[in-house]
Image (spheres, rainbow, N blue to C red):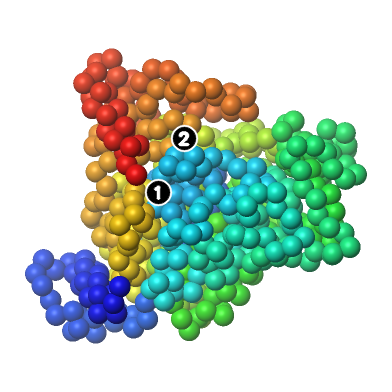
Amino acid sequence: MSNNTIKKIQKSVLSILVLMTIGCSEQVDVASATIEKKAPVKKPNVVIFYVDDLGFGDLSSYGMTATKTPNVDELAAQGIRFTDAHSSAATCTPSRYSLLTGQYAFRNNAAILPGDAPLIIDHTKPTLPKMMKKAGYKTAVVGKWHLGLGRGEVDWNKDVKPGPLELGFDYSFLMPATGDRVPTVYLENHKVVNLDPSDPITISYEKRVGDRPVGTESPELLKQTADLQHSATIVNGISRIGWMKGGKSAEWVDEDFPQVFTDKAIDFIQESKDEAFMLFFPFHDIHVPRVPNKMFAGKSGMGPRGDAILQMDWMTGRIVDELKKQGLYENTLIIYSSDNGPVMDDGYDDFAEEMRGEHDPSGGFRGGKYSAYEAGTRVPMIVTYPNGMIEAGESDALISHIDLYKTLATLAGVELEANEAVDSVNVLPALLNSKLSARDEMLEESFTLSLRAGKWKYIEPFSGVTPDWLANKTAIENGLTTEPQLYDISSDQKEQLNLADKYPDKVIELQQRLDSIRALK
Protein backbone atom coordinates (compact mmCIF):
# COMPACT_ATOMS: atom_id res chain seq x y z
CA MET A 1 0.00 0.00 0.00
CA SER A 2 1.40 3.40 -0.99
CA ASN A 3 2.07 6.26 1.42
CA ASN A 4 -0.52 8.34 -0.46
CA THR A 5 -3.17 5.69 0.18
CA ILE A 6 -2.34 5.59 3.89
CA LYS A 7 -2.49 9.39 4.12
CA LYS A 8 -5.89 9.45 2.44
CA ILE A 9 -7.25 6.86 4.90
CA GLN A 10 -5.80 8.76 7.86
CA LYS A 11 -7.32 12.03 6.61
CA SER A 12 -10.70 10.30 6.23
CA VAL A 13 -10.48 8.89 9.76
CA LEU A 14 -9.53 12.29 11.14
CA SER A 15 -12.55 13.82 9.39
CA ILE A 16 -14.80 11.27 11.08
CA LEU A 17 -13.25 11.91 14.48
CA VAL A 18 -13.56 15.66 14.17
CA LEU A 19 -17.17 15.50 12.98
CA MET A 20 -18.17 13.13 15.77
CA THR A 21 -16.41 15.17 18.41
CA ILE A 22 -17.82 18.58 17.54
CA GLY A 23 -21.25 17.18 16.69
CA CYS A 24 -21.48 18.66 13.18
CA SER A 25 -23.85 17.35 10.54
CA GLU A 26 -22.16 19.23 7.67
CA GLN A 27 -18.64 19.07 6.27
CA VAL A 28 -15.98 21.18 7.97
CA ASP A 29 -12.46 22.08 7.03
CA VAL A 30 -10.37 19.32 8.62
CA ALA A 31 -7.24 21.41 8.97
CA SER A 32 -8.98 24.27 10.81
CA ALA A 33 -11.06 21.89 12.94
CA THR A 34 -7.91 20.05 13.90
CA ILE A 35 -6.36 23.26 15.17
CA GLU A 36 -9.53 24.19 17.04
CA LYS A 37 -9.78 20.80 18.75
CA LYS A 38 -6.02 20.56 19.27
CA ALA A 39 -5.95 17.12 17.69
CA PRO A 40 -2.68 15.33 18.40
CA VAL A 41 0.14 15.66 15.93
CA LYS A 42 1.31 12.16 16.83
CA LYS A 43 -0.91 9.15 16.24
CA PRO A 44 -2.81 8.19 19.38
CA ASN A 45 -1.15 5.63 21.61
CA VAL A 46 -3.30 2.59 22.37
CA VAL A 47 -3.44 0.79 25.74
CA ILE A 48 -5.64 -2.31 26.05
CA PHE A 49 -6.29 -3.42 29.64
CA TYR A 50 -7.59 -6.99 29.50
CA VAL A 51 -8.66 -8.23 32.93
CA ASP A 52 -9.14 -11.96 33.54
CA ASP A 53 -12.52 -13.30 34.76
CA LEU A 54 -13.92 -9.86 35.66
CA GLY A 55 -17.71 -9.94 35.63
CA PHE A 56 -20.15 -7.29 34.45
CA GLY A 57 -20.94 -6.40 38.07
CA ASP A 58 -17.39 -6.46 39.46
CA LEU A 59 -16.68 -2.71 39.28
CA SER A 60 -18.19 0.04 41.39
CA SER A 61 -18.82 1.98 38.17
CA TYR A 62 -20.97 -0.99 37.10
CA GLY A 63 -22.92 -1.23 40.33
CA MET A 64 -20.66 -3.04 42.79
CA THR A 65 -21.19 -1.67 46.31
CA ALA A 66 -19.19 -4.15 48.39
CA THR A 67 -15.91 -2.35 47.64
CA LYS A 68 -14.61 0.42 45.37
CA THR A 69 -12.52 0.51 42.19
CA PRO A 70 -11.65 4.24 42.03
CA ASN A 71 -9.01 4.11 39.30
CA VAL A 72 -11.18 2.24 36.83
CA ASP A 73 -14.18 4.34 37.86
CA GLU A 74 -12.24 7.47 36.91
CA LEU A 75 -11.76 6.07 33.41
CA ALA A 76 -15.49 5.35 33.24
CA ALA A 77 -16.32 8.89 34.35
CA GLN A 78 -14.10 10.41 31.66
CA GLY A 79 -14.98 8.04 28.83
CA ILE A 80 -17.67 5.71 27.54
CA ARG A 81 -19.11 2.98 29.76
CA PHE A 82 -20.53 0.23 27.56
CA THR A 83 -23.43 -1.89 28.78
CA ASP A 84 -23.64 -4.40 25.91
CA ALA A 85 -19.98 -5.08 25.11
CA HIS A 86 -18.73 -8.67 24.93
CA SER A 87 -15.65 -10.78 24.92
CA SER A 88 -15.82 -13.00 21.87
CA ALA A 89 -15.90 -16.13 24.01
CA ALA A 90 -16.77 -17.26 27.52
CA THR A 91 -13.24 -18.55 28.19
CA CYS A 92 -9.83 -16.93 28.03
CA THR A 93 -7.82 -18.61 25.26
CA PRO A 94 -10.55 -18.24 22.61
CA SER A 95 -11.15 -14.60 23.57
CA ARG A 96 -7.46 -13.72 23.29
CA TYR A 97 -7.18 -15.59 20.01
CA SER A 98 -10.06 -13.61 18.51
CA LEU A 99 -8.83 -10.26 19.79
CA LEU A 100 -5.39 -10.75 18.21
CA THR A 101 -6.58 -12.30 14.93
CA GLY A 102 -9.99 -10.76 14.25
CA GLN A 103 -11.33 -14.28 13.67
CA TYR A 104 -13.63 -16.46 15.72
CA ALA A 105 -11.74 -19.05 17.71
CA PHE A 106 -13.85 -21.94 16.41
CA ARG A 107 -12.25 -21.42 12.99
CA ASN A 108 -9.01 -22.74 14.49
CA ASN A 109 -10.54 -25.02 17.14
CA ALA A 110 -8.97 -22.73 19.75
CA ALA A 111 -9.86 -23.91 23.25
CA ILE A 112 -8.46 -23.65 26.78
CA LEU A 113 -4.82 -24.73 26.51
CA PRO A 114 -2.50 -26.71 28.78
CA GLY A 115 0.65 -24.96 29.91
CA ASP A 116 2.89 -26.68 27.35
CA ALA A 117 0.69 -26.17 24.27
CA PRO A 118 2.20 -24.94 20.99
CA LEU A 119 1.41 -21.43 19.75
CA ILE A 120 -2.11 -21.61 18.31
CA ILE A 121 -1.88 -18.43 16.21
CA ASP A 122 -0.14 -18.95 12.88
CA HIS A 123 2.80 -16.55 13.08
CA THR A 124 2.95 -16.32 9.28
CA LYS A 125 -0.54 -14.77 9.13
CA PRO A 126 -1.73 -11.21 9.88
CA THR A 127 -2.25 -10.25 13.53
CA LEU A 128 -3.29 -7.14 15.44
CA PRO A 129 0.28 -6.22 16.50
CA LYS A 130 1.60 -6.78 12.96
CA MET A 131 -1.10 -4.50 11.64
CA MET A 132 -0.23 -1.79 14.17
CA LYS A 133 3.45 -2.07 13.24
CA LYS A 134 2.48 -1.35 9.63
CA ALA A 135 1.13 1.96 10.88
CA GLY A 136 4.42 2.75 12.63
CA TYR A 137 3.47 1.64 16.14
CA LYS A 138 5.86 0.11 18.66
CA THR A 139 4.07 -2.85 20.27
CA ALA A 140 4.28 -4.76 23.55
CA VAL A 141 2.42 -7.39 25.51
CA VAL A 142 2.89 -7.62 29.28
CA GLY A 143 0.99 -10.11 31.43
CA LYS A 144 -0.83 -13.42 31.05
CA TRP A 145 -0.44 -15.09 27.63
CA HIS A 146 -2.17 -18.51 27.43
CA LEU A 147 -2.04 -18.79 23.65
CA GLY A 148 0.65 -21.43 23.52
CA LEU A 149 4.35 -21.09 22.77
CA GLY A 150 6.76 -22.75 20.41
CA ARG A 151 5.83 -25.70 18.24
CA GLY A 152 5.09 -28.17 21.00
CA GLU A 153 7.29 -29.92 23.57
CA VAL A 154 8.94 -26.62 24.49
CA ASP A 155 12.49 -26.69 25.85
CA TRP A 156 12.23 -23.92 28.45
CA ASN A 157 16.02 -23.82 28.80
CA LYS A 158 16.51 -22.48 25.27
CA ASP A 159 14.90 -19.70 23.24
CA VAL A 160 11.14 -20.25 23.35
CA LYS A 161 9.69 -19.42 19.96
CA PRO A 162 7.61 -18.79 17.97
CA GLY A 163 5.73 -16.58 20.39
CA PRO A 164 4.60 -12.97 20.76
CA LEU A 165 7.63 -11.52 18.95
CA GLU A 166 6.87 -13.61 15.89
CA LEU A 167 3.26 -12.40 16.04
CA GLY A 168 4.35 -8.77 15.76
CA PHE A 169 5.07 -7.62 19.31
CA ASP A 170 8.35 -5.75 19.69
CA TYR A 171 8.54 -6.67 23.37
CA SER A 172 6.91 -9.27 25.58
CA PHE A 173 7.02 -10.09 29.27
CA LEU A 174 4.76 -13.00 30.03
CA MET A 175 3.22 -15.44 32.34
CA PRO A 176 3.48 -18.25 29.75
CA ALA A 177 0.10 -19.84 30.44
CA THR A 178 -1.91 -19.15 33.61
CA GLY A 179 -1.17 -18.76 37.31
CA ASP A 180 -2.54 -22.21 38.04
CA ARG A 181 -0.35 -23.99 35.48
CA VAL A 182 3.34 -24.77 35.32
CA PRO A 183 5.84 -23.49 34.35
CA THR A 184 5.65 -20.92 37.15
CA VAL A 185 8.24 -18.60 35.59
CA TYR A 186 8.35 -15.33 33.67
CA LEU A 187 9.25 -15.33 30.00
CA GLU A 188 10.84 -12.13 28.66
CA ASN A 189 10.92 -12.11 24.88
CA HIS A 190 12.28 -15.60 24.12
CA LYS A 191 13.95 -16.44 27.44
CA VAL A 192 12.93 -17.58 30.90
CA VAL A 193 13.91 -14.88 33.40
CA ASN A 194 16.61 -15.67 36.02
CA LEU A 195 17.05 -19.26 34.88
CA ASP A 196 20.12 -21.04 36.25
CA PRO A 197 21.54 -23.29 33.49
CA SER A 198 22.71 -25.74 36.15
CA ASP A 199 19.10 -26.23 37.27
CA PRO A 200 17.22 -26.75 33.99
CA ILE A 201 13.42 -26.80 33.79
CA THR A 202 11.45 -29.91 32.89
CA ILE A 203 7.67 -29.69 32.46
CA SER A 204 5.20 -32.53 32.11
CA TYR A 205 1.43 -32.68 31.87
CA GLU A 206 1.53 -36.45 31.49
CA LYS A 207 3.40 -37.73 34.53
CA ARG A 208 5.14 -36.55 37.66
CA VAL A 209 8.69 -35.28 37.22
CA GLY A 210 11.18 -34.18 39.87
CA ASP A 211 10.88 -34.37 43.62
CA ARG A 212 8.94 -31.22 44.43
CA PRO A 213 6.00 -31.78 46.80
CA VAL A 214 2.54 -32.04 45.28
CA GLY A 215 -0.81 -30.93 46.63
CA THR A 216 -2.33 -34.38 46.97
CA GLU A 217 0.49 -35.53 49.27
CA SER A 218 1.46 -32.37 51.20
CA PRO A 219 -1.66 -30.32 51.92
CA GLU A 220 0.02 -28.85 55.01
CA LEU A 221 2.27 -26.82 52.67
CA LEU A 222 -0.62 -25.11 50.92
CA LYS A 223 -1.91 -21.55 51.31
CA GLN A 224 -5.16 -22.75 49.71
CA THR A 225 -6.39 -26.28 49.24
CA ALA A 226 -7.48 -27.18 45.72
CA ASP A 227 -9.43 -29.69 43.68
CA LEU A 228 -7.69 -32.71 42.17
CA GLN A 229 -7.01 -30.98 38.84
CA HIS A 230 -5.06 -28.21 40.62
CA SER A 231 -3.17 -30.45 43.04
CA ALA A 232 0.08 -31.31 41.29
CA THR A 233 3.42 -29.46 41.81
CA ILE A 234 3.48 -26.95 44.67
CA VAL A 235 5.21 -23.62 44.04
CA ASN A 236 5.02 -20.76 46.55
CA GLY A 237 2.48 -22.63 48.65
CA ILE A 238 0.08 -23.13 45.72
CA SER A 239 -0.47 -26.46 43.98
CA ARG A 240 -0.76 -26.16 40.19
CA ILE A 241 -1.91 -28.07 37.13
CA GLY A 242 1.03 -30.11 35.80
CA TRP A 243 4.43 -31.10 37.13
CA MET A 244 7.63 -29.05 37.15
CA LYS A 245 11.22 -30.00 37.86
CA GLY A 246 14.11 -27.53 38.24
CA GLY A 247 14.09 -23.79 37.57
CA LYS A 248 14.12 -22.87 41.26
CA SER A 249 15.85 -19.51 40.72
CA ALA A 250 13.31 -18.55 38.04
CA GLU A 251 10.16 -19.21 40.08
CA TRP A 252 7.70 -16.39 40.42
CA VAL A 253 6.10 -15.28 43.69
CA ASP A 254 2.37 -14.79 43.16
CA GLU A 255 2.17 -11.89 45.58
CA ASP A 256 4.70 -9.97 43.45
CA PHE A 257 2.59 -9.96 40.26
CA PRO A 258 1.20 -6.43 40.69
CA GLN A 259 4.65 -4.82 40.98
CA VAL A 260 6.42 -7.04 38.43
CA PHE A 261 3.91 -6.72 35.59
CA THR A 262 3.11 -3.07 36.24
CA ASP A 263 6.79 -2.12 36.40
CA LYS A 264 7.43 -3.81 33.04
CA ALA A 265 4.51 -1.95 31.47
CA ILE A 266 5.79 1.33 32.87
CA ASP A 267 9.28 0.61 31.56
CA PHE A 268 7.83 0.11 28.09
CA ILE A 269 5.87 3.36 28.29
CA GLN A 270 8.96 5.28 29.37
CA GLU A 271 11.09 3.78 26.61
CA SER A 272 8.42 4.42 23.95
CA LYS A 273 7.17 7.86 24.97
CA ASP A 274 8.60 9.58 21.89
CA GLU A 275 6.85 7.30 19.39
CA ALA A 276 3.37 5.92 18.89
CA PHE A 277 2.90 2.66 20.79
CA MET A 278 0.35 -0.05 21.52
CA LEU A 279 0.49 -1.78 24.91
CA PHE A 280 -1.57 -4.95 25.38
CA PHE A 281 -1.80 -5.55 29.14
CA PRO A 282 -3.61 -8.84 29.89
CA PHE A 283 -3.90 -9.17 33.69
CA HIS A 284 -3.55 -12.38 35.64
CA ASP A 285 -6.07 -10.99 38.14
CA ILE A 286 -8.70 -11.98 39.01
CA HIS A 287 -8.02 -15.49 37.77
CA VAL A 288 -7.19 -18.27 40.23
CA PRO A 289 -5.08 -18.78 42.22
CA ARG A 290 -5.95 -15.50 43.91
CA VAL A 291 -2.96 -14.66 46.07
CA PRO A 292 -3.05 -10.87 46.47
CA ASN A 293 -0.15 -8.76 47.66
CA LYS A 294 -0.16 -7.79 51.34
CA MET A 295 -1.21 -4.26 50.31
CA PHE A 296 -4.62 -5.68 49.38
CA ALA A 297 -4.99 -8.91 51.36
CA GLY A 298 -8.05 -8.68 53.60
CA LYS A 299 -8.97 -5.15 52.41
CA SER A 300 -12.08 -5.84 50.32
CA GLY A 301 -14.13 -7.77 52.86
CA MET A 302 -14.87 -10.33 50.12
CA GLY A 303 -11.85 -12.59 50.51
CA PRO A 304 -9.01 -13.06 48.02
CA ARG A 305 -11.23 -12.56 44.97
CA GLY A 306 -12.36 -9.15 46.16
CA ASP A 307 -8.80 -8.31 47.18
CA ALA A 308 -7.63 -9.25 43.68
CA ILE A 309 -10.14 -6.77 42.25
CA LEU A 310 -8.58 -4.03 44.40
CA GLN A 311 -5.14 -5.13 43.24
CA MET A 312 -6.23 -4.97 39.60
CA ASP A 313 -7.62 -1.47 40.13
CA TRP A 314 -4.34 -0.32 41.70
CA MET A 315 -2.35 -1.70 38.77
CA THR A 316 -4.62 0.12 36.32
CA GLY A 317 -4.12 3.34 38.25
CA ARG A 318 -0.34 3.03 38.25
CA ILE A 319 -0.18 2.65 34.47
CA VAL A 320 -2.63 5.50 33.84
CA ASP A 321 -0.66 7.69 36.25
CA GLU A 322 2.51 6.95 34.28
CA LEU A 323 0.79 7.99 31.05
CA LYS A 324 -0.11 11.27 32.76
CA LYS A 325 3.39 11.71 34.18
CA GLN A 326 4.90 11.30 30.72
CA GLY A 327 2.41 13.72 29.16
CA LEU A 328 0.88 10.89 27.10
CA TYR A 329 -2.54 10.47 28.66
CA GLU A 330 -4.28 13.09 26.54
CA ASN A 331 -3.14 11.31 23.38
CA THR A 332 -3.84 7.73 24.44
CA LEU A 333 -6.86 5.65 23.50
CA ILE A 334 -7.49 3.39 26.50
CA ILE A 335 -9.66 0.29 26.11
CA TYR A 336 -10.46 -1.50 29.37
CA SER A 337 -12.36 -4.79 29.48
CA SER A 338 -12.36 -8.47 30.51
CA ASP A 339 -11.68 -11.72 28.66
CA ASN A 340 -14.87 -13.44 29.85
CA GLY A 341 -17.43 -13.43 32.61
CA PRO A 342 -16.94 -14.15 36.31
CA VAL A 343 -16.38 -17.36 38.20
CA MET A 344 -16.34 -17.90 41.95
CA ASP A 345 -15.01 -21.40 42.65
CA ASP A 346 -12.56 -22.27 39.88
CA GLY A 347 -10.48 -24.95 41.58
CA TYR A 348 -9.13 -23.37 44.77
CA ASP A 349 -10.73 -23.05 48.20
CA ASP A 350 -10.41 -19.29 48.61
CA PHE A 351 -13.98 -18.80 49.91
CA ALA A 352 -14.95 -16.53 47.02
CA GLU A 353 -18.56 -17.71 47.09
CA GLU A 354 -18.86 -17.76 50.86
CA MET A 355 -17.47 -14.23 51.28
CA ARG A 356 -19.13 -12.38 48.40
CA GLY A 357 -22.14 -11.46 50.54
CA GLU A 358 -24.79 -9.67 48.47
CA HIS A 359 -22.37 -8.91 45.64
CA ASP A 360 -23.47 -10.21 42.22
CA PRO A 361 -20.40 -10.49 39.97
CA SER A 362 -22.61 -11.17 36.91
CA GLY A 363 -24.45 -7.89 37.39
CA GLY A 364 -27.91 -9.43 37.11
CA PHE A 365 -27.22 -11.53 34.02
CA ARG A 366 -27.48 -15.30 33.88
CA GLY A 367 -24.41 -17.56 33.83
CA GLY A 368 -20.75 -16.63 34.06
CA LYS A 369 -17.44 -17.91 32.80
CA TYR A 370 -17.83 -21.01 30.57
CA SER A 371 -21.53 -20.21 30.02
CA ALA A 372 -23.59 -19.71 26.86
CA TYR A 373 -25.80 -17.30 28.78
CA GLU A 374 -25.14 -13.56 28.68
CA ALA A 375 -22.83 -13.33 31.70
CA GLY A 376 -20.39 -15.62 29.90
CA THR A 377 -19.35 -12.84 27.53
CA ARG A 378 -21.12 -9.63 28.59
CA VAL A 379 -18.37 -7.79 30.42
CA PRO A 380 -17.46 -4.28 31.53
CA MET A 381 -15.90 -2.20 28.78
CA ILE A 382 -14.65 1.36 29.14
CA VAL A 383 -13.05 3.49 26.45
CA THR A 384 -11.33 6.81 27.03
CA TYR A 385 -9.57 9.19 24.68
CA PRO A 386 -9.18 12.37 26.75
CA ASN A 387 -8.00 14.82 24.09
CA GLY A 388 -11.49 16.09 23.27
CA MET A 389 -11.93 13.24 20.78
CA ILE A 390 -14.67 11.32 22.54
CA GLU A 391 -18.34 11.85 23.31
CA ALA A 392 -18.46 10.43 26.83
CA GLY A 393 -21.38 8.77 28.56
CA GLU A 394 -23.14 5.41 28.74
CA SER A 395 -23.52 3.38 25.56
CA ASP A 396 -25.73 0.40 24.79
CA ALA A 397 -23.95 -0.29 21.48
CA LEU A 398 -23.49 -3.99 20.73
CA ILE A 399 -19.74 -4.59 20.47
CA SER A 400 -17.43 -7.62 20.48
CA HIS A 401 -13.73 -7.55 21.30
CA ILE A 402 -13.16 -9.23 17.96
CA ASP A 403 -13.99 -5.81 16.50
CA LEU A 404 -10.92 -4.13 18.00
CA TYR A 405 -8.74 -5.39 15.13
CA LYS A 406 -10.62 -3.68 12.30
CA THR A 407 -11.47 -0.68 14.46
CA LEU A 408 -7.83 0.01 15.33
CA ALA A 409 -6.87 -0.55 11.70
CA THR A 410 -9.28 2.23 10.75
CA LEU A 411 -7.91 4.48 13.48
CA ALA A 412 -4.33 3.80 12.39
CA GLY A 413 -5.09 4.17 8.69
CA VAL A 414 -4.16 0.63 7.65
CA GLU A 415 -5.90 -1.04 4.73
CA LEU A 416 -6.46 -4.70 5.61
CA GLU A 417 -5.85 -7.61 3.29
CA ALA A 418 -8.84 -9.47 1.85
CA ASN A 419 -8.47 -12.44 4.20
CA GLU A 420 -7.47 -10.43 7.29
CA ALA A 421 -9.67 -10.14 10.40
CA VAL A 422 -12.61 -11.63 8.50
CA ASP A 423 -14.96 -11.60 11.50
CA SER A 424 -14.03 -8.15 12.78
CA VAL A 425 -16.25 -5.09 12.26
CA ASN A 426 -15.17 -1.46 12.34
CA VAL A 427 -16.98 0.09 15.33
CA LEU A 428 -14.80 3.20 15.64
CA PRO A 429 -17.74 5.65 15.62
CA ALA A 430 -19.34 3.85 18.61
CA LEU A 431 -15.98 3.56 20.34
CA LEU A 432 -15.67 7.35 20.30
CA ASN A 433 -19.28 8.47 20.64
CA SER A 434 -21.61 7.07 23.28
CA LYS A 435 -24.66 8.03 21.21
CA LEU A 436 -23.79 5.87 18.20
CA SER A 437 -24.63 2.21 17.55
CA ALA A 438 -22.31 -0.57 16.40
CA ARG A 439 -23.23 -4.16 15.46
CA ASP A 440 -26.66 -5.44 14.43
CA GLU A 441 -25.76 -9.04 15.24
CA MET A 442 -23.02 -10.79 17.19
CA LEU A 443 -21.80 -14.33 17.69
CA GLU A 444 -20.90 -15.56 21.19
CA GLU A 445 -18.68 -18.61 21.72
CA SER A 446 -18.80 -20.98 24.68
CA PHE A 447 -18.93 -24.76 24.42
CA THR A 448 -21.64 -24.07 21.88
CA LEU A 449 -22.43 -21.05 19.71
CA SER A 450 -24.97 -18.31 20.38
CA LEU A 451 -26.23 -15.49 18.20
CA ARG A 452 -27.50 -12.08 19.20
CA ALA A 453 -29.67 -10.54 16.46
CA GLY A 454 -31.79 -7.51 17.26
CA LYS A 455 -33.85 -8.32 20.33
CA TRP A 456 -33.19 -12.06 20.02
CA LYS A 457 -30.61 -14.32 21.64
CA TYR A 458 -30.38 -17.81 20.17
CA ILE A 459 -28.33 -20.62 21.75
CA GLU A 460 -27.55 -23.53 19.47
CA PRO A 461 -28.30 -27.03 20.81
CA PHE A 462 -25.24 -28.78 22.23
CA SER A 463 -24.60 -32.27 20.90
CA GLY A 464 -21.15 -32.87 22.34
CA VAL A 465 -19.96 -34.28 25.64
CA THR A 466 -19.66 -31.81 28.50
CA PRO A 467 -16.12 -32.05 29.96
CA ASP A 468 -16.10 -33.70 33.38
CA TRP A 469 -14.44 -30.71 35.01
CA LEU A 470 -17.19 -28.41 33.71
CA ALA A 471 -19.97 -30.82 34.62
CA ASN A 472 -18.59 -30.87 38.16
CA LYS A 473 -18.94 -27.09 38.44
CA THR A 474 -22.56 -27.33 39.47
CA ALA A 475 -22.73 -23.68 40.54
CA ILE A 476 -22.22 -22.58 36.91
CA GLU A 477 -25.19 -22.56 34.54
CA ASN A 478 -23.33 -23.49 31.38
CA GLY A 479 -26.37 -23.25 29.10
CA LEU A 480 -25.61 -26.53 27.35
CA THR A 481 -28.79 -28.35 26.39
CA THR A 482 -29.82 -30.60 23.52
CA GLU A 483 -32.75 -28.29 22.77
CA PRO A 484 -32.61 -24.89 21.03
CA GLN A 485 -32.97 -21.84 23.27
CA LEU A 486 -34.45 -18.52 22.15
CA TYR A 487 -34.74 -15.47 24.40
CA ASP A 488 -36.12 -11.98 23.91
CA ILE A 489 -33.23 -10.00 25.39
CA SER A 490 -35.16 -6.72 25.19
CA SER A 491 -37.67 -7.89 27.81
CA ASP A 492 -35.88 -10.90 29.35
CA GLN A 493 -32.26 -9.98 29.96
CA LYS A 494 -31.95 -12.75 32.54
CA GLU A 495 -32.86 -15.36 29.88
CA GLN A 496 -35.56 -17.04 31.94
CA LEU A 497 -38.22 -17.71 29.30
CA ASN A 498 -37.23 -19.99 26.41
CA LEU A 499 -39.39 -19.01 23.42
CA ALA A 500 -38.04 -21.57 20.96
CA ASP A 501 -41.30 -23.54 20.83
CA LYS A 502 -43.34 -20.36 20.38
CA TYR A 503 -41.24 -19.00 17.50
CA PRO A 504 -39.98 -22.01 15.51
CA ASP A 505 -39.50 -19.93 12.35
CA LYS A 506 -37.18 -17.57 14.21
CA VAL A 507 -35.19 -20.55 15.50
CA ILE A 508 -34.76 -21.85 11.93
CA GLU A 509 -33.77 -18.38 10.69
CA LEU A 510 -31.14 -17.84 13.38
CA GLN A 511 -29.75 -21.37 13.06
CA GLN A 512 -29.33 -20.80 9.33
CA ARG A 513 -27.55 -17.54 10.02
CA LEU A 514 -25.22 -19.30 12.46
CA ASP A 515 -24.52 -21.94 9.85
CA SER A 516 -23.65 -19.28 7.27
CA ILE A 517 -21.20 -17.59 9.67
CA ARG A 518 -19.65 -20.95 10.47
CA ALA A 519 -19.19 -21.70 6.76
CA LEU A 520 -17.38 -18.41 6.02
CA LYS A 521 -13.72 -19.01 5.19
The circle drawn on residue 479 is none
Q: Name the residue carrying label 1.
A: 103
Q: Is residue 246 above or below residue 104?
A: below
Q: Quadrant of the N terminus?
A: bottom left
Any part of residue 460 in sight: yes
Picture coordinates of residue 115 (x, y %)? 67, 46
Farthest residue toward the left?
26
Picture coordinates of residue 185 (x, y %)? 74, 57
Any part of residue 305 in sight: no
Tag 1 secondary structure? loop
Amino acid type, callout 2: Ser
Rounded to the nearest whole Å, what is the CA distance between mark 2 and mark 1? 15 Å
Characterize the local packing of mark 1: few (<14), some (14-19) or many (20 or more) Cα atoms within 10 angstroms.
many
Q: Is residue 52 left or right of residue 215?
A: left
Quadrant assignment, res 474: top right
Picture coordinates of residue 293 (x, y %)? 71, 56
Q: Residue at x 74, y 52 (%)?
A: 184
Amino acid type, callout 1: Gln
The circle drawn on residue 446 is 2
Q: Is residue 257 left or right of residue 317?
A: right
Sequence-wise, the earlier of marks 2 and 1 is 1
Quadrant assignment, res 295: bottom right
Tag 2 secondary structure? loop
Q: Residue at x 63, y 34 (%)?
A: 345
Q: Nearer the viewer, residue 181 or 295?
A: 181
Q: Is residue 189 above or below residue 401?
A: below
